[in-house]
Image (spheres, helix red, strand yellow):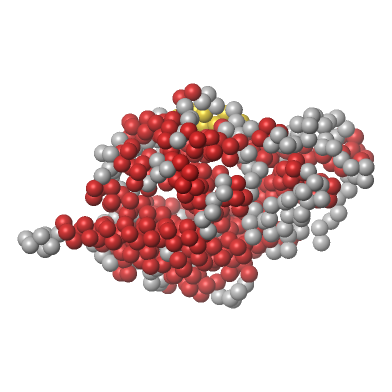
Amino acid sequence: MRPRFLLTPALLLLLACPKAPPPPIGEAQKQIDRRLWYAVQDLASQAEALLAQQEEMIWKNWTEGTPADIAKTYEGKDKLFSSVSIQMIDQLRKSSIAAYQCTAVERGEPPQCPKDAWGSLEVRALTYLHVYFVGEHLSAMLVDQSDAIANLEASLTFTAAGKEYHYRDLDRLLAVEKDPEKRQALYLGATRAVERISLLARRKDERAEALLKELGYPSYESFGEAIRYGNMDEIAQFAEQVLELTQNAYAKAMDRVAQRELHTPFEKLRRADIPRLFKPQNMQFFFPKDELLSRAQSTLKGLGFELSAMKNIRLDLRELTYKNPRPLTVSVAIPGDVRVSLKPTGGARDQAALLHELGLALRFASMKDPDQAYPAGRAGFKPDLRFELTRLGSGAVAQAFAILFEQLVEDPEWLQQNASLTGQKLQSQLMVAHAHRLYQVRRRAGKLLYDVAVHRGEEPDARAVYHRIMSRAYGLAITTEDDARYVVDRDELYQPADDLRAWLIARQLQQTLKKRFGASWWRSPRAGDLLRELWSKGGALYPQEIATSVDAATSTDELLRSFAAACSGLAETRAEAETAESPVANGY
Protein backbone atom coordinates (compact mmCIF):
# COMPACT_ATOMS: atom_id res chain seq x y z
CA MET A 1 0.00 0.00 0.00
CA ARG A 2 1.24 3.49 -0.82
CA PRO A 3 2.44 5.31 2.34
CA ARG A 4 0.45 8.36 3.19
CA PHE A 5 2.35 11.64 2.81
CA LEU A 6 1.93 14.49 5.30
CA LEU A 7 3.42 17.97 4.95
CA THR A 8 5.62 18.83 7.92
CA PRO A 9 5.59 22.29 9.58
CA ALA A 10 9.15 22.85 8.36
CA LEU A 11 8.12 22.22 4.76
CA LEU A 12 5.14 24.51 5.12
CA LEU A 13 7.43 27.33 6.27
CA LEU A 14 9.84 26.59 3.42
CA LEU A 15 7.04 26.95 0.89
CA ALA A 16 5.50 30.05 2.44
CA CYS A 17 6.68 32.43 -0.33
CA PRO A 18 4.40 31.97 -3.36
CA LYS A 19 5.51 32.74 -6.91
CA ALA A 20 1.98 32.72 -8.36
CA PRO A 21 -1.52 32.93 -6.85
CA PRO A 22 -3.23 29.60 -6.24
CA PRO A 23 -6.52 28.79 -7.96
CA PRO A 24 -9.70 29.90 -6.25
CA ILE A 25 -10.80 27.24 -3.80
CA GLY A 26 -13.97 26.40 -1.96
CA GLU A 27 -14.53 27.01 1.73
CA ALA A 28 -14.31 23.31 2.48
CA GLN A 29 -10.78 22.99 1.18
CA LYS A 30 -8.11 22.97 3.79
CA GLN A 31 -5.22 25.41 4.07
CA ILE A 32 -2.85 22.57 3.35
CA ASP A 33 -4.13 22.46 -0.24
CA ARG A 34 -2.89 26.00 -0.75
CA ARG A 35 0.53 25.01 0.54
CA LEU A 36 0.50 21.97 -1.71
CA TRP A 37 -0.14 24.27 -4.68
CA TYR A 38 2.99 26.29 -3.95
CA ALA A 39 5.02 23.15 -3.36
CA VAL A 40 3.95 21.60 -6.66
CA GLN A 41 4.59 24.89 -8.49
CA ASP A 42 8.15 24.79 -7.20
CA LEU A 43 8.61 21.18 -8.34
CA ALA A 44 7.28 22.03 -11.81
CA SER A 45 9.64 25.02 -12.11
CA GLN A 46 12.64 22.89 -11.17
CA ALA A 47 11.66 20.20 -13.67
CA GLU A 48 11.13 22.77 -16.40
CA ALA A 49 14.57 24.30 -15.82
CA LEU A 50 16.15 20.84 -15.85
CA LEU A 51 14.52 19.91 -19.16
CA ALA A 52 15.60 23.20 -20.75
CA GLN A 53 19.17 22.53 -19.63
CA GLN A 54 19.06 19.02 -21.08
CA GLU A 55 17.57 20.21 -24.39
CA GLU A 56 20.37 22.78 -24.73
CA MET A 57 22.96 20.12 -24.00
CA ILE A 58 21.46 17.69 -26.53
CA TRP A 59 21.37 20.43 -29.18
CA LYS A 60 25.04 21.28 -28.77
CA ASN A 61 26.00 17.63 -28.83
CA TRP A 62 23.89 17.02 -31.96
CA THR A 63 25.00 20.02 -33.98
CA GLU A 64 28.48 20.82 -32.61
CA GLY A 65 29.74 17.51 -31.29
CA THR A 66 30.04 18.89 -27.75
CA PRO A 67 30.10 16.03 -25.20
CA ALA A 68 26.72 15.61 -23.45
CA ASP A 69 26.58 14.27 -19.92
CA ILE A 70 22.87 14.10 -19.19
CA ALA A 71 23.49 12.14 -15.99
CA LYS A 72 25.38 15.11 -14.59
CA THR A 73 22.28 17.32 -14.87
CA TYR A 74 20.59 15.16 -12.24
CA GLU A 75 23.33 15.67 -9.65
CA GLY A 76 21.97 17.26 -6.51
CA LYS A 77 18.38 16.60 -7.58
CA ASP A 78 17.77 13.34 -5.76
CA LYS A 79 14.80 14.83 -3.92
CA LEU A 80 13.18 16.37 -6.99
CA PHE A 81 11.85 13.11 -8.45
CA SER A 82 11.51 11.32 -5.12
CA SER A 83 8.50 9.33 -3.99
CA VAL A 84 7.69 12.21 -1.64
CA SER A 85 7.41 14.62 -4.59
CA ILE A 86 5.26 12.12 -6.48
CA GLN A 87 2.88 11.75 -3.55
CA MET A 88 2.67 15.52 -3.14
CA ILE A 89 1.63 16.01 -6.78
CA ASP A 90 -0.84 13.14 -6.61
CA GLN A 91 -2.37 14.51 -3.42
CA LEU A 92 -2.98 17.90 -5.04
CA ARG A 93 -4.28 16.22 -8.19
CA LYS A 94 -6.84 14.19 -6.24
CA SER A 95 -7.82 17.23 -4.23
CA SER A 96 -8.38 19.20 -7.46
CA ILE A 97 -10.49 16.40 -8.92
CA ALA A 98 -12.72 16.57 -5.87
CA ALA A 99 -12.79 20.39 -5.72
CA TYR A 100 -13.82 20.78 -9.36
CA GLN A 101 -16.11 17.73 -9.22
CA CYS A 102 -14.19 16.12 -12.07
CA THR A 103 -14.57 12.58 -13.24
CA ALA A 104 -11.75 10.42 -11.90
CA VAL A 105 -8.92 9.97 -14.39
CA GLU A 106 -8.93 6.22 -14.78
CA ARG A 107 -7.46 4.03 -17.53
CA GLY A 108 -6.27 6.95 -19.60
CA GLU A 109 -9.59 8.75 -19.87
CA PRO A 110 -9.41 12.59 -19.99
CA PRO A 111 -10.81 14.36 -16.91
CA GLN A 112 -14.08 16.23 -17.30
CA CYS A 113 -14.95 18.97 -14.82
CA PRO A 114 -18.46 20.16 -15.63
CA LYS A 115 -18.62 23.06 -13.16
CA ASP A 116 -15.53 24.86 -14.42
CA ALA A 117 -13.75 24.68 -17.79
CA TRP A 118 -10.47 25.66 -16.21
CA GLY A 119 -10.75 22.84 -13.70
CA SER A 120 -10.23 20.26 -16.43
CA LEU A 121 -7.03 22.00 -17.51
CA GLU A 122 -5.68 22.13 -13.99
CA VAL A 123 -6.38 18.45 -13.41
CA ARG A 124 -4.82 17.58 -16.76
CA ALA A 125 -1.73 19.61 -15.95
CA LEU A 126 -1.36 17.84 -12.61
CA THR A 127 -1.96 14.47 -14.27
CA TYR A 128 0.79 15.17 -16.81
CA LEU A 129 3.15 16.31 -14.07
CA HIS A 130 2.42 13.25 -11.91
CA VAL A 131 3.05 10.81 -14.78
CA TYR A 132 6.24 12.66 -15.76
CA PHE A 133 7.62 12.52 -12.21
CA VAL A 134 6.82 8.82 -11.91
CA GLY A 135 8.61 8.23 -15.20
CA GLU A 136 11.69 10.16 -14.05
CA HIS A 137 11.69 8.33 -10.71
CA LEU A 138 11.42 5.01 -12.51
CA SER A 139 14.31 5.92 -14.83
CA ALA A 140 16.48 6.88 -11.87
CA MET A 141 15.74 3.63 -10.06
CA LEU A 142 16.50 1.61 -13.22
CA VAL A 143 19.62 3.50 -14.22
CA ASP A 144 21.96 0.62 -13.37
CA GLN A 145 20.01 -1.83 -15.53
CA SER A 146 19.67 0.70 -18.36
CA ASP A 147 23.38 1.51 -18.30
CA ALA A 148 24.28 -2.17 -18.29
CA ILE A 149 22.15 -2.78 -21.41
CA ALA A 150 23.52 0.31 -23.19
CA ASN A 151 27.11 -0.60 -22.38
CA LEU A 152 26.62 -4.19 -23.51
CA GLU A 153 25.02 -3.10 -26.80
CA ALA A 154 27.89 -0.67 -27.43
CA SER A 155 30.56 -3.31 -26.83
CA LEU A 156 28.91 -6.42 -28.31
CA THR A 157 30.28 -7.96 -31.47
CA PHE A 158 29.28 -11.01 -33.45
CA THR A 159 30.91 -13.18 -36.07
CA ALA A 160 29.56 -14.07 -39.51
CA ALA A 161 31.47 -15.85 -42.28
CA GLY A 162 34.69 -15.51 -40.29
CA LYS A 163 34.41 -11.71 -39.87
CA GLU A 164 33.62 -9.73 -36.73
CA TYR A 165 30.98 -6.99 -36.71
CA HIS A 166 29.54 -4.56 -34.18
CA TYR A 167 26.05 -5.57 -33.06
CA ARG A 168 24.77 -1.98 -33.37
CA ASP A 169 25.61 -2.03 -37.09
CA LEU A 170 23.35 -5.00 -37.86
CA ASP A 171 20.45 -3.15 -39.54
CA ARG A 172 22.83 -1.03 -41.63
CA LEU A 173 24.76 -4.12 -42.69
CA LEU A 174 21.57 -5.91 -43.71
CA ALA A 175 20.40 -2.88 -45.71
CA VAL A 176 23.57 -2.60 -47.80
CA GLU A 177 24.20 -6.34 -48.32
CA LYS A 178 22.97 -7.47 -51.75
CA ASP A 179 23.45 -11.22 -51.30
CA PRO A 180 20.45 -12.79 -49.45
CA GLU A 181 22.55 -15.66 -48.04
CA LYS A 182 25.09 -13.23 -46.63
CA ARG A 183 22.23 -11.21 -45.10
CA GLN A 184 20.95 -14.35 -43.43
CA ALA A 185 24.44 -15.22 -42.16
CA LEU A 186 24.73 -11.77 -40.57
CA TYR A 187 21.31 -12.10 -38.98
CA LEU A 188 22.02 -15.57 -37.59
CA GLY A 189 25.45 -14.51 -36.37
CA ALA A 190 23.87 -11.77 -34.24
CA THR A 191 21.50 -14.16 -32.46
CA ARG A 192 23.90 -14.94 -29.61
CA ALA A 193 24.37 -11.20 -29.00
CA VAL A 194 20.58 -10.84 -28.88
CA GLU A 195 20.34 -13.57 -26.25
CA ARG A 196 22.92 -11.82 -24.03
CA ILE A 197 21.00 -8.55 -24.18
CA SER A 198 17.75 -10.41 -23.49
CA LEU A 199 19.01 -11.59 -20.09
CA LEU A 200 19.56 -8.01 -18.94
CA ALA A 201 16.32 -6.77 -20.51
CA ARG A 202 14.28 -9.38 -18.60
CA ARG A 203 15.84 -8.31 -15.30
CA LYS A 204 15.04 -4.69 -16.05
CA ASP A 205 11.39 -5.54 -16.83
CA GLU A 206 11.03 -7.46 -13.58
CA ARG A 207 12.55 -4.61 -11.59
CA ALA A 208 10.27 -2.06 -13.30
CA GLU A 209 7.13 -4.03 -12.42
CA ALA A 210 8.21 -4.25 -8.77
CA LEU A 211 8.94 -0.51 -8.59
CA LEU A 212 5.59 0.44 -10.10
CA LYS A 213 3.77 -1.60 -7.48
CA GLU A 214 5.76 0.21 -4.78
CA LEU A 215 4.52 3.49 -6.27
CA GLY A 216 0.91 2.36 -5.98
CA TYR A 217 0.21 1.11 -9.51
CA PRO A 218 -1.63 -2.23 -9.40
CA SER A 219 0.05 -3.46 -12.56
CA TYR A 220 2.56 -2.64 -15.28
CA GLU A 221 -0.37 -2.05 -17.64
CA SER A 222 -2.01 0.48 -15.33
CA PHE A 223 1.06 2.72 -15.55
CA GLY A 224 1.27 2.01 -19.28
CA GLU A 225 -2.24 3.39 -19.65
CA ALA A 226 -1.33 6.40 -17.54
CA ILE A 227 1.79 7.30 -19.51
CA ARG A 228 0.05 6.72 -22.88
CA TYR A 229 -3.16 8.51 -21.81
CA GLY A 230 -5.39 5.85 -23.22
CA ASN A 231 -7.38 2.72 -22.45
CA MET A 232 -5.23 -0.26 -23.41
CA ASP A 233 -8.24 -2.42 -24.29
CA GLU A 234 -9.37 0.18 -26.85
CA ILE A 235 -5.89 0.69 -28.28
CA ALA A 236 -5.36 -3.08 -28.53
CA GLN A 237 -8.71 -3.36 -30.32
CA PHE A 238 -7.48 -0.82 -32.87
CA ALA A 239 -4.25 -2.80 -33.27
CA GLU A 240 -6.32 -5.90 -33.96
CA GLN A 241 -8.30 -3.95 -36.58
CA VAL A 242 -5.04 -2.92 -38.24
CA LEU A 243 -3.91 -6.51 -38.65
CA GLU A 244 -7.29 -7.78 -39.76
CA LEU A 245 -8.34 -5.05 -42.22
CA THR A 246 -4.98 -4.53 -43.93
CA GLN A 247 -3.94 -8.16 -44.35
CA ASN A 248 -4.80 -8.58 -48.04
CA ALA A 249 -3.53 -5.14 -49.06
CA TYR A 250 -0.31 -5.76 -47.12
CA ALA A 251 0.32 -9.06 -48.90
CA LYS A 252 -0.20 -7.43 -52.32
CA ALA A 253 1.89 -4.33 -51.59
CA MET A 254 4.78 -6.21 -50.02
CA ASP A 255 4.85 -8.78 -52.81
CA ARG A 256 5.04 -6.03 -55.42
CA VAL A 257 7.89 -4.28 -53.59
CA ALA A 258 9.72 -7.58 -53.02
CA GLN A 259 9.43 -8.51 -56.70
CA ARG A 260 10.69 -5.11 -57.76
CA GLU A 261 13.48 -4.58 -55.25
CA LEU A 262 14.71 -8.12 -54.52
CA HIS A 263 13.27 -10.06 -57.47
CA THR A 264 11.73 -12.53 -55.04
CA PRO A 265 8.12 -13.21 -53.98
CA PHE A 266 7.37 -11.74 -50.57
CA GLU A 267 6.38 -15.13 -49.13
CA LYS A 268 9.94 -16.34 -49.69
CA LEU A 269 11.58 -13.46 -47.83
CA ARG A 270 13.08 -13.74 -44.36
CA ARG A 271 13.26 -11.19 -41.58
CA ALA A 272 16.88 -10.55 -42.51
CA ASP A 273 15.70 -9.22 -45.89
CA ILE A 274 13.42 -6.45 -44.59
CA PRO A 275 16.11 -3.76 -44.07
CA ARG A 276 17.30 -4.35 -47.64
CA LEU A 277 13.76 -4.32 -48.97
CA PHE A 278 13.21 -0.80 -47.65
CA LYS A 279 16.67 0.55 -48.28
CA PRO A 280 16.20 4.29 -49.01
CA GLN A 281 15.40 4.79 -52.67
CA ASN A 282 17.73 6.90 -54.79
CA MET A 283 15.41 9.84 -55.55
CA GLN A 284 18.02 12.61 -55.33
CA PHE A 285 17.16 13.81 -58.83
CA PHE A 286 13.62 14.66 -57.72
CA PHE A 287 14.62 15.67 -54.17
CA PRO A 288 18.03 17.42 -54.45
CA LYS A 289 19.39 18.39 -51.08
CA ASP A 290 19.71 22.08 -51.96
CA GLU A 291 15.94 22.26 -52.61
CA LEU A 292 14.69 20.45 -49.50
CA LEU A 293 14.28 23.59 -47.41
CA SER A 294 12.85 25.83 -50.14
CA ARG A 295 10.28 23.15 -50.95
CA ALA A 296 9.26 22.88 -47.31
CA GLN A 297 9.09 26.67 -46.97
CA SER A 298 6.88 26.90 -50.04
CA THR A 299 4.52 24.29 -48.61
CA LEU A 300 4.26 26.07 -45.27
CA LYS A 301 3.78 29.44 -46.95
CA GLY A 302 0.65 28.11 -48.62
CA LEU A 303 -0.71 27.44 -45.13
CA GLY A 304 0.13 30.96 -44.01
CA PHE A 305 3.39 30.20 -42.21
CA GLU A 306 6.38 32.33 -43.25
CA LEU A 307 9.13 30.12 -41.86
CA SER A 308 11.90 32.67 -42.46
CA ALA A 309 9.95 35.27 -40.45
CA MET A 310 9.37 33.00 -37.44
CA LYS A 311 12.22 34.09 -35.19
CA ASN A 312 11.31 31.49 -32.57
CA ILE A 313 12.28 28.63 -34.93
CA ARG A 314 15.98 28.13 -35.61
CA LEU A 315 17.01 25.87 -38.50
CA ASP A 316 20.41 24.19 -38.72
CA LEU A 317 20.98 22.42 -42.04
CA ARG A 318 24.77 22.69 -42.02
CA GLU A 319 26.72 19.72 -43.40
CA LEU A 320 29.42 19.53 -40.74
CA THR A 321 31.50 16.40 -40.31
CA TYR A 322 30.86 16.17 -36.57
CA LYS A 323 27.11 16.80 -36.87
CA ASN A 324 24.69 13.96 -36.12
CA PRO A 325 23.01 13.06 -39.44
CA ARG A 326 19.67 12.14 -37.86
CA PRO A 327 16.93 14.82 -37.80
CA LEU A 328 16.14 16.45 -34.46
CA THR A 329 13.77 19.03 -32.97
CA VAL A 330 14.38 20.47 -29.51
CA SER A 331 12.28 22.97 -27.60
CA VAL A 332 14.57 24.83 -25.20
CA ALA A 333 11.76 27.27 -24.38
CA ILE A 334 8.18 27.03 -25.63
CA PRO A 335 7.19 28.88 -27.74
CA GLY A 336 10.19 31.20 -27.85
CA ASP A 337 13.14 28.92 -28.66
CA VAL A 338 12.49 25.94 -30.92
CA ARG A 339 15.30 24.41 -33.01
CA VAL A 340 15.50 21.97 -35.92
CA SER A 341 18.61 20.12 -37.07
CA LEU A 342 19.10 18.13 -40.27
CA LYS A 343 22.21 17.07 -42.14
CA PRO A 344 20.74 16.77 -45.64
CA THR A 345 21.87 14.24 -48.21
CA GLY A 346 18.90 14.54 -50.55
CA GLY A 347 16.18 12.08 -51.47
CA ALA A 348 12.55 11.47 -50.57
CA ARG A 349 13.37 10.20 -47.06
CA ASP A 350 15.32 13.38 -46.33
CA GLN A 351 12.42 15.53 -47.53
CA ALA A 352 10.01 13.56 -45.37
CA ALA A 353 12.34 13.90 -42.36
CA LEU A 354 12.54 17.69 -42.73
CA LEU A 355 8.76 18.02 -43.03
CA HIS A 356 8.37 15.76 -39.99
CA GLU A 357 10.62 17.94 -37.84
CA LEU A 358 8.96 21.16 -39.05
CA GLY A 359 5.58 19.72 -38.08
CA LEU A 360 6.90 19.28 -34.55
CA ALA A 361 8.56 22.69 -34.50
CA LEU A 362 5.48 24.57 -35.71
CA ARG A 363 3.36 23.03 -32.99
CA PHE A 364 5.80 24.05 -30.25
CA ALA A 365 6.26 27.53 -31.73
CA SER A 366 2.49 28.13 -32.01
CA MET A 367 1.50 27.35 -28.44
CA LYS A 368 -0.13 30.01 -26.28
CA ASP A 369 -0.54 30.66 -22.59
CA PRO A 370 -3.38 28.52 -21.20
CA ASP A 371 -5.58 31.54 -20.46
CA GLN A 372 -5.05 32.87 -24.00
CA ALA A 373 -5.86 29.58 -25.66
CA TYR A 374 -8.80 29.08 -23.28
CA PRO A 375 -10.38 32.50 -22.58
CA ALA A 376 -13.11 30.79 -20.55
CA GLY A 377 -10.65 30.43 -17.68
CA ARG A 378 -11.18 32.26 -14.39
CA ALA A 379 -10.96 36.04 -14.80
CA GLY A 380 -7.82 37.62 -13.43
CA PHE A 381 -6.17 34.28 -12.72
CA LYS A 382 -3.12 33.30 -14.78
CA PRO A 383 -1.68 30.07 -13.37
CA ASP A 384 1.91 29.03 -13.90
CA LEU A 385 1.03 25.84 -15.79
CA ARG A 386 2.93 26.47 -19.04
CA PHE A 387 5.34 23.64 -18.43
CA GLU A 388 2.73 20.95 -17.85
CA LEU A 389 0.43 22.00 -20.69
CA THR A 390 3.10 22.65 -23.30
CA ARG A 391 6.05 20.33 -22.80
CA LEU A 392 4.35 17.38 -21.09
CA GLY A 393 1.37 15.25 -22.08
CA SER A 394 0.88 12.62 -24.75
CA GLY A 395 3.69 12.01 -27.19
CA ALA A 396 1.11 10.70 -29.67
CA VAL A 397 -0.39 14.17 -30.14
CA ALA A 398 2.96 15.80 -30.95
CA GLN A 399 3.97 13.01 -33.33
CA ALA A 400 0.60 13.12 -35.10
CA PHE A 401 1.29 16.58 -36.50
CA ALA A 402 4.81 15.55 -37.47
CA ILE A 403 3.43 12.55 -39.38
CA LEU A 404 0.77 14.74 -41.02
CA PHE A 405 3.50 16.78 -42.70
CA GLU A 406 5.83 13.83 -43.27
CA GLN A 407 3.10 12.04 -45.21
CA LEU A 408 3.06 14.77 -47.83
CA VAL A 409 5.87 12.80 -49.49
CA GLU A 410 3.29 10.00 -49.85
CA ASP A 411 0.65 12.29 -51.38
CA PRO A 412 0.30 12.19 -55.21
CA GLU A 413 -0.93 15.80 -55.40
CA TRP A 414 1.98 17.13 -53.36
CA LEU A 415 4.55 15.02 -55.26
CA GLN A 416 3.33 16.22 -58.63
CA GLN A 417 3.22 19.87 -57.58
CA ASN A 418 6.46 20.00 -55.61
CA ALA A 419 8.73 17.29 -57.00
CA SER A 420 7.45 17.11 -60.59
CA LEU A 421 6.93 13.38 -60.20
CA THR A 422 4.61 11.91 -62.81
CA GLY A 423 3.88 8.63 -64.56
CA GLN A 424 5.72 5.51 -63.50
CA LYS A 425 8.16 7.38 -61.27
CA LEU A 426 5.24 8.75 -59.28
CA GLN A 427 3.56 5.35 -59.04
CA SER A 428 6.79 3.69 -57.92
CA GLN A 429 7.39 6.27 -55.19
CA LEU A 430 3.81 5.99 -53.95
CA MET A 431 3.87 2.19 -53.96
CA VAL A 432 7.10 1.87 -51.98
CA ALA A 433 6.14 4.66 -49.55
CA HIS A 434 2.70 3.17 -48.85
CA ALA A 435 4.07 -0.36 -48.49
CA HIS A 436 6.69 0.87 -46.03
CA ARG A 437 4.06 2.79 -44.04
CA LEU A 438 1.81 -0.27 -43.98
CA TYR A 439 4.70 -2.43 -42.79
CA GLN A 440 5.50 0.05 -39.99
CA VAL A 441 1.89 0.28 -38.83
CA ARG A 442 1.39 -3.49 -38.82
CA ARG A 443 4.67 -4.06 -37.00
CA ARG A 444 3.66 -1.63 -34.27
CA ALA A 445 0.21 -3.18 -34.03
CA GLY A 446 1.76 -6.60 -33.58
CA LYS A 447 4.24 -5.38 -30.98
CA LEU A 448 1.48 -3.72 -28.98
CA LEU A 449 -0.67 -6.85 -28.98
CA TYR A 450 2.38 -8.86 -27.96
CA ASP A 451 3.19 -6.42 -25.13
CA VAL A 452 -0.37 -6.55 -23.81
CA ALA A 453 -0.52 -10.36 -23.96
CA VAL A 454 2.83 -10.78 -22.17
CA HIS A 455 2.11 -8.37 -19.33
CA ARG A 456 -1.36 -9.79 -18.81
CA GLY A 457 0.08 -13.29 -18.62
CA GLU A 458 -2.46 -14.62 -21.10
CA GLU A 459 -0.08 -17.44 -22.04
CA PRO A 460 2.84 -18.78 -19.97
CA ASP A 461 5.25 -19.00 -22.91
CA ALA A 462 6.15 -15.47 -24.08
CA ARG A 463 8.23 -16.87 -26.93
CA ALA A 464 5.19 -18.73 -28.27
CA VAL A 465 3.08 -15.56 -27.98
CA TYR A 466 5.70 -13.64 -29.95
CA HIS A 467 5.79 -16.30 -32.66
CA ARG A 468 2.01 -16.34 -33.05
CA ILE A 469 1.43 -12.57 -33.12
CA MET A 470 4.50 -11.35 -35.00
CA SER A 471 4.31 -13.99 -37.73
CA ARG A 472 0.86 -12.61 -38.42
CA ALA A 473 2.02 -8.98 -38.29
CA TYR A 474 5.06 -9.51 -40.52
CA GLY A 475 3.30 -11.89 -42.88
CA LEU A 476 6.42 -14.06 -42.94
CA ALA A 477 7.34 -17.50 -41.69
CA ILE A 478 8.98 -16.83 -38.30
CA THR A 479 12.02 -19.01 -37.57
CA THR A 480 13.67 -20.11 -34.34
CA GLU A 481 16.25 -17.35 -34.79
CA ASP A 482 13.44 -14.79 -35.16
CA ASP A 483 11.81 -16.09 -31.99
CA ALA A 484 15.08 -15.45 -30.15
CA ARG A 485 14.27 -11.72 -30.50
CA TYR A 486 11.11 -12.08 -28.40
CA VAL A 487 12.58 -10.04 -25.54
CA VAL A 488 14.58 -7.34 -27.37
CA ASP A 489 11.76 -6.79 -29.89
CA ARG A 490 9.46 -5.54 -27.11
CA ASP A 491 9.25 -1.80 -26.37
CA GLU A 492 9.05 -0.33 -22.89
CA LEU A 493 5.74 0.81 -21.45
CA TYR A 494 3.67 0.19 -24.58
CA GLN A 495 5.46 2.71 -26.82
CA PRO A 496 3.76 1.23 -29.93
CA ALA A 497 0.47 2.57 -28.53
CA ASP A 498 1.71 6.14 -29.07
CA ASP A 499 3.04 5.28 -32.53
CA LEU A 500 -0.26 3.74 -33.63
CA ARG A 501 -2.40 6.56 -32.26
CA ALA A 502 -0.14 9.21 -33.80
CA TRP A 503 -0.57 7.62 -37.23
CA LEU A 504 -4.34 7.31 -36.70
CA ILE A 505 -4.66 10.98 -35.68
CA ALA A 506 -2.53 12.07 -38.64
CA ARG A 507 -4.79 10.13 -41.05
CA GLN A 508 -7.91 11.60 -39.46
CA LEU A 509 -6.49 15.11 -39.71
CA GLN A 510 -5.44 14.53 -43.32
CA GLN A 511 -8.93 13.36 -44.32
CA THR A 512 -10.55 16.29 -42.51
CA LEU A 513 -8.24 18.82 -44.16
CA LYS A 514 -8.86 17.35 -47.62
CA LYS A 515 -12.60 17.31 -47.09
CA ARG A 516 -12.70 20.93 -45.95
CA PHE A 517 -10.00 22.54 -48.06
CA GLY A 518 -9.48 20.25 -51.04
CA ALA A 519 -6.87 17.69 -52.12
CA SER A 520 -4.15 20.37 -52.00
CA TRP A 521 -5.05 21.43 -48.46
CA TRP A 522 -1.51 22.73 -47.85
CA ARG A 523 -2.32 25.61 -50.20
CA SER A 524 -5.13 26.91 -48.00
CA PRO A 525 -4.43 29.55 -45.30
CA ARG A 526 -7.70 28.45 -43.67
CA ALA A 527 -6.19 24.97 -43.22
CA GLY A 528 -3.25 26.71 -41.54
CA ASP A 529 -5.69 28.54 -39.25
CA LEU A 530 -7.25 25.24 -38.20
CA LEU A 531 -3.84 23.75 -37.40
CA ARG A 532 -2.75 26.91 -35.59
CA GLU A 533 -5.84 26.71 -33.39
CA LEU A 534 -5.09 23.10 -32.49
CA TRP A 535 -1.43 23.89 -31.80
CA SER A 536 -2.31 26.84 -29.58
CA LYS A 537 -3.84 24.43 -27.07
CA GLY A 538 -0.54 22.64 -26.54
CA GLY A 539 -0.93 19.38 -24.68
CA ALA A 540 -4.31 20.26 -23.21
CA LEU A 541 -6.02 17.80 -25.56
CA TYR A 542 -5.82 14.06 -25.03
CA PRO A 543 -5.18 11.94 -28.17
CA GLN A 544 -8.78 10.73 -28.31
CA GLU A 545 -10.05 14.32 -28.31
CA ILE A 546 -8.23 15.49 -31.45
CA ALA A 547 -10.66 13.88 -33.91
CA THR A 548 -13.64 15.29 -32.02
CA SER A 549 -12.12 18.78 -31.98
CA VAL A 550 -11.98 18.87 -35.81
CA ASP A 551 -15.26 16.97 -36.32
CA ALA A 552 -13.51 14.05 -38.00
CA ALA A 553 -16.42 11.79 -38.88
CA THR A 554 -14.47 8.87 -40.38
CA SER A 555 -14.48 5.77 -38.18
CA THR A 556 -11.28 3.84 -37.58
CA ASP A 557 -12.78 0.95 -39.53
CA GLU A 558 -13.46 3.16 -42.56
CA LEU A 559 -10.06 4.82 -42.29
CA LEU A 560 -8.23 1.50 -42.29
CA ARG A 561 -10.28 0.16 -45.18
CA SER A 562 -9.59 3.26 -47.30
CA PHE A 563 -5.88 3.11 -46.53
CA ALA A 564 -5.76 -0.60 -47.36
CA ALA A 565 -7.64 0.03 -50.62
CA ALA A 566 -5.18 2.75 -51.62
CA CYS A 567 -2.20 0.46 -50.94
CA SER A 568 -3.82 -2.42 -52.80
CA GLY A 569 -4.70 -0.21 -55.76
CA LEU A 570 -1.14 1.10 -56.04
CA ALA A 571 0.25 -2.44 -56.01
CA GLU A 572 -2.15 -3.57 -58.75
CA THR A 573 -1.47 -0.48 -60.89
CA ARG A 574 2.27 -0.96 -60.62
CA ALA A 575 1.98 -4.68 -61.43
CA GLU A 576 0.03 -3.87 -64.60
CA ALA A 577 2.58 -1.24 -65.60
CA GLU A 578 5.50 -3.63 -65.09
CA THR A 579 3.76 -6.30 -67.16
CA ALA A 580 3.22 -3.81 -69.98
CA GLU A 581 6.88 -2.75 -69.81
CA SER A 582 8.33 -6.27 -69.81
CA PRO A 583 10.03 -7.63 -72.99
CA VAL A 584 7.79 -10.71 -73.04
CA ALA A 585 4.59 -8.66 -72.82
CA ASN A 586 5.78 -6.53 -75.72
CA GLY A 587 6.63 -9.51 -77.93
CA TYR A 588 10.43 -9.23 -77.81
Name the residue rendered at 59%, 28% in the picture. Answer: 336
Which quadrant, please, contains the N terminus?
bottom right
Residues 577 and 433: in front is 577
Name the residue rendered at 44%, 62% in the picture. Answer: 561
Residues 56 and 532: in front is 532
Residues 7 and 350: in front is 350
Name the residue rendered at 59%, 76% in the picture. Answer: 460
Residue 405 position, x and y percent, is 45, 42
Which quadrant, please, contains the C terminus?
bottom left
Task: Residue 108: tell me if it is visible.
Answer: yes
Name the residue rendered at 69%, 36% in the picture. Answer: 374
Residues 489 and 106: in front is 106
The answer to which image quadrant residue 390 occupies is: top right
The answer to which image quadrant residue 292 occupies is: top left
Q: Residue furthest bottom?
A: 460
Tally the numbered discs: 0
Say if 504 sits above or below 418 in the image: below
Please state if 72 lies on the left or on the right of 175 as rendered: right
Please state if 153 lies on the left or on the right of 164 as rendered: right
Please state if 109 lies on the left or on the right of 93 as rendered: left
Say if 371 sits above or below 133 in the image: above
Residue 170 position, x and y percent, is 39, 55
Residue 536 position, x and y percent, is 61, 36
Residue 578 position, x and y percent, is 20, 58
Q: Residue furthest left?
A: 588
Task: Residue 349: tell me if it is visible.
Answer: no
